[in-house]
């Protein structure tokens, strides 16, 4: 694990967290974004009450405290004014909320970023409607993966927010290999091992477990509930699985993806929205260009052929002469197969036929048989050996007919 330099950690304080709320298909979710290391977080809310807001917000400073990073202030919209006293008394942080009609630009921008990543994740899945549990885990996971990469405007362009918070290193087999919503066969441990009950269940992959031993959180397609397992096998998605997921989404009352902000206004997938602060790239395109650099002259092969070698262009008469010579030469080298449609040619001979088979031998029993062609192993000579039906029983050997 890479250690953050001490000189860089001293620049983290003071740290401000920006709060906001977004709705994913009607599910309220608390989103946060800090001012120094640019870490994003998303916590699902049980409801929109003040107690639910406080319980979810309490999980965010704990992640910073485990990395010995302390939150000094929290900025939010007017909707969080009921948390003013509880936050300042219990979290030891100053709470500031914007006046009515105003908003926190950084908090609004992070909602749009998270919404775009959720749309991309849902677009990759073959399901039109997503069940409640799967959509919730997609939103949380996509927000966490934003912290895997360095952020523009952060304290460092090398270290990521994931490293600043001293989180476990990323494992390809555990965190990336299986896409969320993939169809898997999940092994189930049974006490009775000699019966005919199934050993695997049909489930959808939700997220890896947050422990050292490993494991996976899965969505059971039969019960629409979360289960955990340590042994899974990804298999292709079938039409039956797609229909089952559609039925589970209908049971949860889910519709096609719709993401809204705190005022229940739909967040469209546009690049820019009025009223949000954007950092424009003022650096010119030729910022890294060396003014003393002289480009190497390009080499023209057309001029070399025409000037150096004095190659004259091919005229139409020369092409006709080449074509006439090719017509006289090709039929001799490559004889064409004759057809009956060719004028002046002899008729096409019929293909040779195979010699007819010898007439069948009629026995006294009235059954007709043909001689059997056999190969002798000594000299591979073809012999016509009579069958038993062709031999008439006679009193003497001289009367045997072959």
Image (cartoon, grey):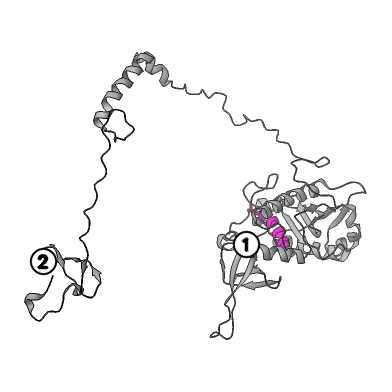
**Is residue 308 positioned above or below 43 on the image?**
above
Going from N to C along the chain, the mark reached first, 1 or 2, is 1
Quadrant in which the N terminus is drawn:
bottom right
Is disc 1 placed on a helix, strand or loop?
helix
**Category of crowding for the residue at label 1, using alpha-carbon neighbours closer than 10 angstroms: few (below 14), some (14–19), many (at least 20):** few
Assign the magenta stretch its main secondary structure: helix
Please give the label number shown on residue 239.
Answer: 1
Q: Residue 52, how many percent across, how many down?
A: 84, 65
Is residue 287 or residue 320 the one in the foreground?
Answer: 320
**Label 2 environment density (alpha carbons within 10 Å; few <14, some 14–19, many ≥20):** few
Q: Which residue is mark 2?
A: 378
The image quadrant where one finds the C terminus is bottom left
Q: Residue at x 84, y 48 (%)?
A: 104
Residue 348 placed where, x, y %? 27, 37
Residue, x 24% and y 49% (percent of image)?
A: 353
The stretch in magenta equals 134-157
Q: Nearer the viewer, residue 219 or 78?
A: 219
Q: Is residue 383 magenta?
A: no
SS category of the residue bearing label 2: loop
Name the residue located 88 percent from the left edge and 64 percent from the top edge: 49
Q: Nearer the viewer, residue 126 or 213?
A: 126
């Amino acid at each position: 694990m890479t250690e953050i330099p001490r000189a860089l950690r001293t620049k983290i304080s003071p740290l401000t967290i920006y709060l906001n709320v977004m709705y994913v298909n009607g599910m309220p979710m608390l989103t946060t974004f800090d001012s120094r290391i640019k870490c994003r977080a998303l916590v699902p809310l049980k409801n929109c009450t003040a107690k639910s807001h406080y319980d979810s917000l309490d999980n965010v400073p704990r992640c910073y405290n485990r990395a010995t990073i302390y939150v000094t202030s929290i900025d939010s919209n007017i909707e969080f004014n009921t948390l003013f006293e509880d936050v300042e008394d219990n979290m030891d942080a100053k709470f500031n909320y914007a006046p009515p009609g105003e908003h926190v630009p950084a908090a609004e921008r992070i909602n749009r970023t998270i919404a775009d990543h959720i749309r991309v994740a849902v677009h990759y899945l073959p399901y039109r409607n997503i069940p409640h549990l799967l959509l919730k885990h997609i939103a949380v996971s996509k927000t966490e993966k934003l912290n895997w990469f360095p952020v523009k405007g952060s304290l460092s362009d090398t270290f990521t927010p994931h490293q600043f918070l001293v989180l476990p290193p990323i494992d390809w087999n555990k965190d990336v290999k299986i896409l969320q919503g993939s169809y898997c066969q999940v092994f189930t441990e049974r006490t009775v091992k000699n019966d005919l009950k199934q050993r695997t269940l049909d489930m959808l992959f939700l997220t890896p477990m947050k422990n050292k031993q490993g494991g996976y959180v899965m969505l059971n397609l039969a019960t629409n509930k979360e289960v955990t397992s340590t042994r899974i096998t990804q298999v292709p998605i079938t039409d039956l699985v797609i229909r089952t997921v559609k039925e589970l989404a209908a049971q949860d009352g889910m519709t096609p993806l719709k993401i809204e902000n705190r005022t229940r206004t739909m967040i469209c997938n546009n690049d820019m929205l009025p009223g949000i602060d954007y950092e424009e790239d003022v650096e010119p395109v030729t910022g890294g260009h060396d003014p003393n650099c002289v480009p190497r002259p390009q080499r023209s092969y057309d001029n070399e052929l025409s000037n150096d070698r004095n190659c004259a262009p091919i005229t139409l008469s020369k092409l006709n002469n080449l074509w006439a010579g090719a017509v006289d030469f090709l039929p001799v080298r490559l004889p064409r197969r004759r057809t009956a449609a060719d004028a002046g040619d002899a008729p096409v001979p019929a293909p040779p036929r195979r010699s007819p088979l010898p007439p069948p031998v009629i026995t006294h029993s009235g059954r007709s048989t043909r001689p059997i062609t056999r190969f002798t192993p000594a000299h591979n000579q073809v012999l016509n050996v009579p069958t038993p039906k062709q031999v008439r029983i006679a009193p003497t050997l001289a009367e045997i007919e072959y």
